[in-house]
């Protein structure tokens, strides 16, 4: 009897295991088909987005749909990379008895990006597929109307071939700015469009990109770029403000309403059809507008992840480097929360030169350490500190610092006003010996796009006495008692 029970139990266990294996095998096939479907949907959506970037879109509903398509596309890229990377790592783990790759204990593993177990990852895949399928189902009408939109005479740079020289994203913002500049306006004072966003999110790049459009250039007799110091001087000029003009005013500091009112009143001499754009980091400048402002936010995590991986891998295929792809996801998370597009560019430039796992891990560890140290000292992330003009401690970026390394941002200028040695951040990260003795200017990034802005910082001489680090006013250090 016991032998019969034992045999029956063994048979049931064997059948149960066979059932699980067959179910797992069919599930794997199903997952692969879903990933192929996801890739096809991404291709269809990206084709439409690229075509939309080459046309003038004035329909507000289409602009909302374009934004939804772009969001779905970047989300799809993120999920596809997540699964492809996970599968590649699992394949390598089966082939390798032991891996030299150190465990990512403190880093956010890409295989867990959608959740802590398989069920949540599959749920994310199904959810993303549903979003893309819905977007594609509603895309037919969008494509038909898009075919009736006028094509731009000069195609924009192709984002997939020349992303270093391309204004990434901002699809709907670009169309809104074009519509403002090309639409007819009635007599009276010229309309004003405020463009507002934090430091280094691409405000001036957006304006320069749109102003390079041939229709915009033919619309105005001249395009005048000013800062707040020029307002009163131009207000009393009888010649510079004549004609049909586009005036772009950049506010680096807070708004002086009295100077602006005097300047804006003087614009009555400008011809009908003239326009004004203001660029500022301060929401207070929203009151200057006569139309709804364009607010430039930091790119979403999915967008920044796509951009960073494209820049960091260059011509290399990310799927050939699954471990690096895993680390790139964590870089994107850190950058989206604590840094900026400038940091994404110079870090990607450094990483692209050395596709080595240990090197990427070392750079990631330095980024996290610098962010945590500054937050502990000042109670703010480095991105916000730089926006406020506060100095930032980047000593930990140097592998063997001879002295503390702090930077003081030079906001609104391409130089410090001093004749100092200039060092690029990428050079300093790759070879700390290039650091000059004493004061120098650190160039974090020089844009390859008009208006070719240089993001520069002053580095003080720490061989002299320098004031001790203090928390920002009204803020606590991490760990301070309540």
Image (cartoon, rainbow, N blue to C red):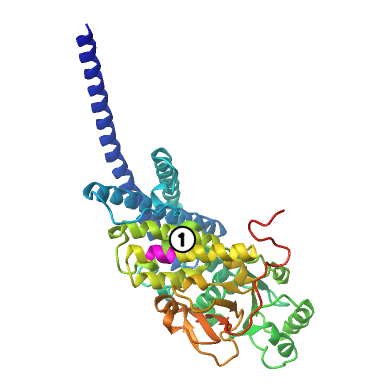
Residue 17 rendering spot, x and y as whole percentages: 25, 27
Point 35% across, 60% down: residue: 324
Q: Nearer the viewer, residue 342 or 465?
A: 465
Determine whether, in the image, residue 89 is placed left or right of residue 406: left
Residue 143 rendering spot, x and y as whole percentages: 43, 57
Region of the chain picked out in magenta, as a range: 360-364
Q: Quadrant of residue 160?
A: bottom left
Q: Nearer the viewer, residue 160 or 304?
A: 304
Position of residue 83 relative to residue 53, above or below, is: above
Point 56% across, 93% down: residue: 419
Q: Nearer the viewer, residue 106 or 244?
A: 106
- Residue 86 is a magenta residue: no
Q: Main secondary structure of the magenta part?
A: helix
Position of residue 5 relative to residue 36, above or below, is: above
Quarter of the picture holding the N terminus: top left
Q: Residues within 10 Å of mark 1 (few under 14, many from 20)?
A: many
The residue that disc 1 covers is 332
Determine whether, in the image, residue 406 is placed left or right of residue 127: right
Question: Visible in this render: residue 258?
Answer: yes
Residue 25 rendering spot, x and y as whole percentages: 25, 36
């Amino acid at each position: 009897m016991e032998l019969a029970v034992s045999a029956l139990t063994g048979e049931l266990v064997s059948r149960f295991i066979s059932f699980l294996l067959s179910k797992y095998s069919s599930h794997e096939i199903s997952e692969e088909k879903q990933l192929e479907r996801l890739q096809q949907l991404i291709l269809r959506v990206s084709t439409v987005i690229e075509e939309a970037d080459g046309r003038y879109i004035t329909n507000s509903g289409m602009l909302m749909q374009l934004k939804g398509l772009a969001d779905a596309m970047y989300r799809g890229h993120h999920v596809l990379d997540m699964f492809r990377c996970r599968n590649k790592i699992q394949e390598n783990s089966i082939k390798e008895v032991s891996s030299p790759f150190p465990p990512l204990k403190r880093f956010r593993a890409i295989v867990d990006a959608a959740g802590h177990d398989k069920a949540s990852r599959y749920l994310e895949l199904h959810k993303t597929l549903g979003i893309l399928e819905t977007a594609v189902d509603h895309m037919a009408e969008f494509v038909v109307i898009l075919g009736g939109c006028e094509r731009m005479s000069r195609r924009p740079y192709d984002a997939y071939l020349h992303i270093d020289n391309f204004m990434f994203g901002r699809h709907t913002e670009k169309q809104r700015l074009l519509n403002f500049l090309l639409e007819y306006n009635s007599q009276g004072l010229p309309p004003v469009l405020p463009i507002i966003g934090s430091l280094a999110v691409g405000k001036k790049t957006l304006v320069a990109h749109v102003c390079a459009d041939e229709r915009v250039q033919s619309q105005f007799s001249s395009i005048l770029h000013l800062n707040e110091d020029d307002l009163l001087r131009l207000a009393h000029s009888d010649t510079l403000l004549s004609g049909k003009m586009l005036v772009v005013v950049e506010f680096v500091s807070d708004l002086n309403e009295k100077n602006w009112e005097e300047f804006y009143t003087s614009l009555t001499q400008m011809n009908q059809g003239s326009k004004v754009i203001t660029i500022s980091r301060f929401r207070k400048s929203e009151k200057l507008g006569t139309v709804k402002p364009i607010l430039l936010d930091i790119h979403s995590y999915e967008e920044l992840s796509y951009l960073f991986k494209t820049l960091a891998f260059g011509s290399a295929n990310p799927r050939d480097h699954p471990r690096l792809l895993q680390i790139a996801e964590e870089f994107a998370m850190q950058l989206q929360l604590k840094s900026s597009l400038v940091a994404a560019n110079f870090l990607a430039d450094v990483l692209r030169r050395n596709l080595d796992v240990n090197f990427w891990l070392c750079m990631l560890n330095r980024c996290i350490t610098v962010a945590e140290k500054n937050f502990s000292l000042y109670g703010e992330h480095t991105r916000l500190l730089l926006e406020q003009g506060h100095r930032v401690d980047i000593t930990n970026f140097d592998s063997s610092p001879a002295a503390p390394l702090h930077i003081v941002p030079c906001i609104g200028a391409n130089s410090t006003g001093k004749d100092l040695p200039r060092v690029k951040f990428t050079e300093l990260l790759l070879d700390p010996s290039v650091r000059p003795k004493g004061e120098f200017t650190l160039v974090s990034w020089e844009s390859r796009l008009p208006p070719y802005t240089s993001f520069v910082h002053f580095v003080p001489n720490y061989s002299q006495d320098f004031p001790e680090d203090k928390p920002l006013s009204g803020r606590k250090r991490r760990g301070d008692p309540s």
